[in-house]
Amino acid sequence: MGHDLITIYWLKALEYILALSYLPLFILFWKFASPKREATVAVHAAAPGWSDQLAGYFQVPANLFFHRGHTWVRLDGGDTVTIGVSDFAQTLVGPLGRVQLPTVGTSLVQGEPALVLDADGASVPMLAPVDGKVVAVNEGLAASSDLAKHAPYGDGWMLKVKSTKLASNLKHLLPGPLAIRWMDTVCESLGAEMAPMELGKVYLDGGQIVDGLARSLSPEAWDEVARRFFLTGDGGRHA
Amino acid sequence: METRMELSRRTFIKFAGAAGAAGVVARPKPAAASALHPVNTPAVLVDTTRCAGCRGCEAACSESNHLPGPALQGQDAVFSKFRKTDVKVYTVVNRAKADSKQGEARYVKSQCMHCLDPACASACLAKALEKTAAGPVVYHPERCLGCRYCMVACQFDVPKFEFDSPSPYINKCSFCAERQEQGLQPACVSVCPTGALQFGHREELIEDARTRIYQNPDKYVHHIYGESEAGGTSWLYITDVPFEKLGFRTDLGATSPPELTRTALAAVPFVLTLWPPLLMGLYTFSKRRAEASKGTDQEAHHD
Amino acid sequence: MTDTTTFDRGFDTRSWITEKIFMGMSFGDYLKSLLTPTNAIFALILIVGVPIVIYRFAFGLGAVTNLTEVNPWGIWIGIDVMSGVALAAGGFTVATAVHVLGLKEYQPIVRPALLTGFLGYLFAVIGLCADLGRPWKLPVPMVYSYGTGSVMFEVGWCVCLYLIVLGLEFSPAAFEWLGLRKAREWAVRMTLVLTIFGLCLSTLHQSSLGALFLMMPHRVHPLWYSGYVPVFFFVSAIIAGMSMVIVESGLSHRVFKSQLNPNDHGTADKLTLGLAKGAAVVLFAYFFLKLQGLVDGDRFDLLLTPYGFWFLFELLGFVLAPCLLYAIAVRRQNATMARWAAGWTVLGIVVNRLNISVIAFNYNAAERYVPGFMEIMVSVTIITIGIITFRWIVNRMPVLHEHPDFPQAH
């Protein structure tokens, strides 16, 4: 073997070279094996109507995160975030009558009910996606309840919150690209739950999701259906 | 001033002396390759130039150990195949694959080499194979699990296993440990008619072998097999045909196999000692970070 | 439902069995629920395999295996013991991540990982008992005859202790299932200590399984033989553990869909990608470690032999390639790609363990070992029983979901 005094020199040199070149390569590899910070994400073609509804947001901004209770968070820089309700949630509930928002100064806890959607006489609570204190409320919603529906991720925002535990909160949220896939899965499993002939209740002819889906599934207890999806069905103890 | 300096010098010397003494005491003695000093350990010198292939050693061995008698006794046909030891055949005599330069047949006796630092005894997790202080490596069947680690560890492929038994043992030559305790020679050596097998102290036998080689440089291969192979064995061989022709592996190093595992085993106490504080440190660090972020939140909630 | 009368008012055996063992079904219904195609395959394996196991114990190793005095170790060591222990390393990896490093977002996969670990080790030990000539002598080195100079002694003790540690770490789930609140609290309190002790034991025995081969430079091919083999085994065990957790999580989410909230899939994807990044980074380091081992061995001449090509194939195809696939999967946030990379890595670990214990082992022997059908069936049977046990436990105990009475603190 090469452990005599003659060949050891070039062997050891080779070991050092290997070790030293590994160090910068490791840094480069770490950077390579990190999620891309690009703005565009390709949504796979089988999306049943989602791409249409998120058409304006086909390019999901990299700073949009989703809570499993279907509320979303946008990072506005610093500690402040904007919170809203996802497209899917609104489609499930149907046309909104009123939105009960917490007052400025209220403290929110991630996973605890934060706001309430009123529609058709019933109330559907939604969970807060982050911890923090409410610093602003979207007054525009009072004027036009359609605002939330037409621009759920833009002008239809619900709250602005100053979050104190953003870093740890984000760990429990889904970033945009993953959330798209997750919402597809939820939708697919919903479709699969219905008997095949009842798919008409889920999808319109054009492939879009029926507005007010919860109601068409269960006219009497549509808010229970919604609660199941928003994780508020059993009291809402979810992060 | 001076007194202080003197005192400190004295103290320094005191401490240096103590440290030096501690260093001397604390430095571990280089570990002996075996419990036994290799000079006096019992050994056997096998001179294959003297072996006539009578297989009296096989017969004596099987009789002394209450084993079935050697196969094909008295028949030359037994040499047509290269035989190996077995669970009930502790030693075999084979014919070498080459004849001597004078055209004489050469025979070689194989058995356990009773290494100075045996792989099998080190490998055995139940101490079923044990290197005794007297020298022989003996087998305690009642402790054996049948894991066969000894078989793969042995560089001479000595231990053999009863594959066709539901309660299998291994077994091998025991160097007649019980006979040696009574001051007798091993059975095989005691019946060898030609003096091919010679029993004695290892260092003396090596001297003897070296003398023979020195006195007959053209005859013998200039190597004593077992002197350094696998860290040294108790059974030593000299021959006048190449050792590969006798069926010996010539690619074995001089490091004893247990020596190769020394570092790995030494790591055990280190891991058990260092990992807990390391992990507790990581735990405390991560807990503190979590509490820090929770703390700012609590501050915010207090107004 | 059932009309029961008991002499002890507190405990009703019949309904307890119905609820806990038969998952609320009557015995007849339960039996009917077992008639699935998967179970048919399992039954077939068991019908063929169990008699072979009995045959092995009745007639010895030679009757069932192709092991000989030249090749005393085969796939029962290579796959059941070596690969089994390596792939069960997910237990200590995830437990350390959550309880020591504080990565609480991985909490949902701690229990499945611990269960995979516990069953992995349990069935590795069972596989070992099939391989041992005299398994009833196992207490000997445990109780009174300590071969302390042996690496295998250390492996045996560490595996035994670690099995107990894993059992205790998993016990809260079992206690929750049984409704034993006090026992569950007691078990939970030991978590940190068990995790640390478990990591110590895992480091030791994972590396020592490799150290077993240190004594055998005369048998292991020089390209695989190295003084660093214990380090290689430990690092690759971490990789194997993380990959196996990804694979198990992916399969469980498909098989046990009914236990899961549709929202859980998103979490599973996120955690899969987190583990994938860890696996990618460690694989990268492991690749360079293997290169260092190659330099240290200084047998570059052997790289151009058939064994050399096989070594390069293992290194490039089963270490570097899955490493890159993992990295790309994380980069693209594609959890499915990560799962494929995980499966590939698991295969690579098995190949590596098989290489050092069977394929590149006794490479220069006159007769080479090839496993026989019965040998393979025994391994398959043992693994199948392990899978069935996993399924039995997950169907009943709060492993993939929380027990409603015992909400996990976040």
Image (cartoon, rainbow, N blue to C red):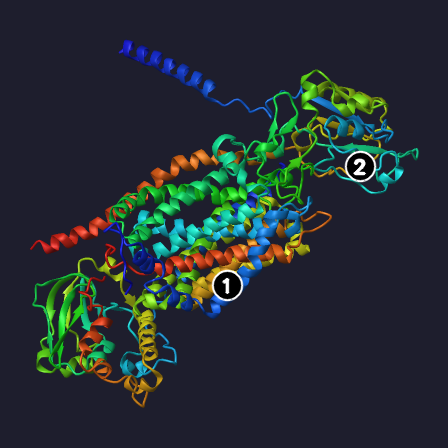
- Which numbered dot is residue A222? none
Q: Is residue B9 above or below residue B60?
A: above
State the SS at label 2: helix
Q: Is residue B67 above or below residue A102?
A: above
Q: Is residue A175 above or below residue C408?
A: below
Residue appearing at x 26%, y 85% in the figure? A210
Where does label 2 land, which residue?
B246
Q: Is residue C274 visible?
A: no
Residue farthest to the bottom, as pictured: A205
Where does label 1 land, which residue?
C42
**Disc 2 marks which amino acid?**
Leu
Residue C82: x and y, percent?
53, 49
**Disc 1 marks which amino acid?**
Phe
Q: Is residue A118 visible?
A: yes
In the image, taking residue C33 as reference, residue B120 lies left or right, namely right
Residue appearing at x 72%, y 38% in the figure? B86
Quarter placement of the N terminus of chain B: top left
In the image, taking residue B291 as reference, residue C267 lies left or right, namely right
